[in-house]
Amino acid sequence: MTDPGTTSRENVLVLYTELAPYVLACLTALTEFYEVDVHLVHWPVNKEAPFDLEFAPGIIAYDRTQLDDEALLQLARRLSPCLVLASGWVDKGYLKACRALRKKGVNTVMSFDTAWRGDLKQWANAALARFWIRRTFSHAWVTGGPQVKYARRLGFTEDRIRTGFYSADTPKWLAIGRRLLDARSEHWPHRFLCVARYIPAKGLQLLCDAFAELCEEKAVLDWELWIVGTGELFDQITNSPTGKHPRIKHLGFKQAHEMESVLEQCGAFVLPSDYEPWGVVVHEMACAGLPLILSTAVGAEERFLEEGVNGHLFWAGDKETLKEALRDILLSNDSKLFLRGRVGMDTASDWSPEEWARTANELSEAK
C-alpha cells in the first residue's frame, strides 16, 4: 500500500458478508492511516442485528444483491486492487473474483472466525481445500488460536496466517470505559448485562434460568440482569417462567450509539453462548471496564479474559458453573469490581483498528 503521507491512493477490495459498526471502524482506520480507498461489497444487513451503518468518505460500498458474479468480476478487474480481503468461502462469486486477481499476483486474503472442531465436515473441507485454496487465496487472516489450527488444515503455512482479524472500535469503547470508571470509584452498578441475539446458540434461556434460581436462593442482593438483543427466540424466552422474572429486563435491540446509556447502569458482562467462535462484544465490554463472565465456547476469552483477574469462565451449557461465576461477582465488593474492570480495560487496549490496519498493510506487501 501507499506509505502514510503520500498523495496517490490505491484500492483495497473487501468482499464481506454481514457488516457491523466494528468492521467499518477497522476499514476507516485503513483509509486514514494508509491513504487507500476501500471498495466494500457486502451482503444485506442482518435483520436480527439491524445496525445503522455510516461509511467514511474513503469507503465506497456496493450491495452484493445488486451485483451478479460477472458484474462483481468486472468490478474487481477494473479496480486493480493492491489487496483483497474476503469473508470465508461461502460466496462463490467472491471466490471467483479472488481467483482472478490472484492470477495477476494480487495478495488475496481469506478471513474467518470458525474454530477447528475436527468434525467430519471440517475434515472434508480440509481435504477439498488443496484443490482450490492456493489458487484462490495467498493468506488467511483469522481471529485466534483455534482458527489458526483450521487455517493450517486448509493448507496455509505458518508464515501465511495472521491473527486478530476482529477488533472493536477500541478508542470509542475505551473512552466510555474511562468515563464510567471515573464515575464508579465510589459506587458500582449492580446489574449484569448480556448483549446477544435471541437464538439457540447464545444460551439466553440458560442465563435466565440460572439468574432466577439465584434470586430464589436470595443470593442476588440488589442485582438485576439486563439483556440487549432480538431474534427468533425473543418471545419464547421473554415469556418463559424465568424470562419473566421481575429482576430480568429484556431491552430489545440497541444501536451502537444507544449502548452507552445502558452501560452506565450495568456493572458486569455475561455471554453464555453454546457456540461463539469469537465475540467482538467481549472486546467492547472489556474496553468499557466491565468484569466478564464467559462460557468456554466464547473464542474471545483467549485474548480478553484473565481467569480470576477480570472475570471468570464457566462450562458452556452448564448451569451450576454459570451460577458459581455469577455468585462470585455478586459476592465481590465494589472496589474489587472496580479493579477487575480496570485490568480488563488494560488488556483490551492492546488491539485496535489502527493495529488491524497495520496488519492489512503488511498483508498487502507480503511475499
Image: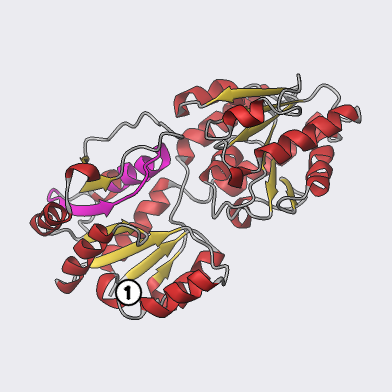
Which x, y percent locates residue 194? 63, 34
From the viewer's perspective, is residue 153 above or below residue 323?
Answer: below
Give the quadrant of the N terminus: bottom left
Q: What is the count of numbered marks? A: 1
Q: Is residue 247 visible?
A: yes
Which x, y percent locates residue 5? 21, 49
Q: Nearer the viewer, residue 99 or 169?
A: 99
* Range drawn in magenta: 7-30
* Disc 1: CA contacts within 10 A as few (<14), some (14-19) or many (>=20): some
Q: Nearer the viewer, residue 49 or 222?
A: 49
Residue at the spot x=24%, y=46% of the render? 40
Q: In this rendering, would 85 be left or right of 102?
A: right
Q: In this rendering, would 328 be left or right of 234?
A: right
Q: How is the image coloured?
A: secondary structure
Which x, y percent locates residue 107? 25, 67
Question: Element type at marker 1?
Answer: helix
Q: In this rendering, would 334 be left or right of 57?
A: right
Please give the residue where the numbered disc 1 appears in the rendered image.
133
Q: List the single residue furthest toward the right.
A: 217
Residue at the spot x=91%, y=27% of the render? 218
Which x, y percent locates residue 63? 23, 41
Give the quadrant of the C terminus: bottom left
Residue at the spot x=12%, y=52% of the render? 71
Residue at the spot x=85%, y=33% of the render? 214
Could you say which quadrant of the image residue 340 lies in?
top right
Q: Is residue 222 magenta?
A: no
Q: In this rendering, would 194 be left or right of 87?
A: right
Q: Is residue 181 visible?
A: no
- The amino acid type found where label 1 is placed reads Ile
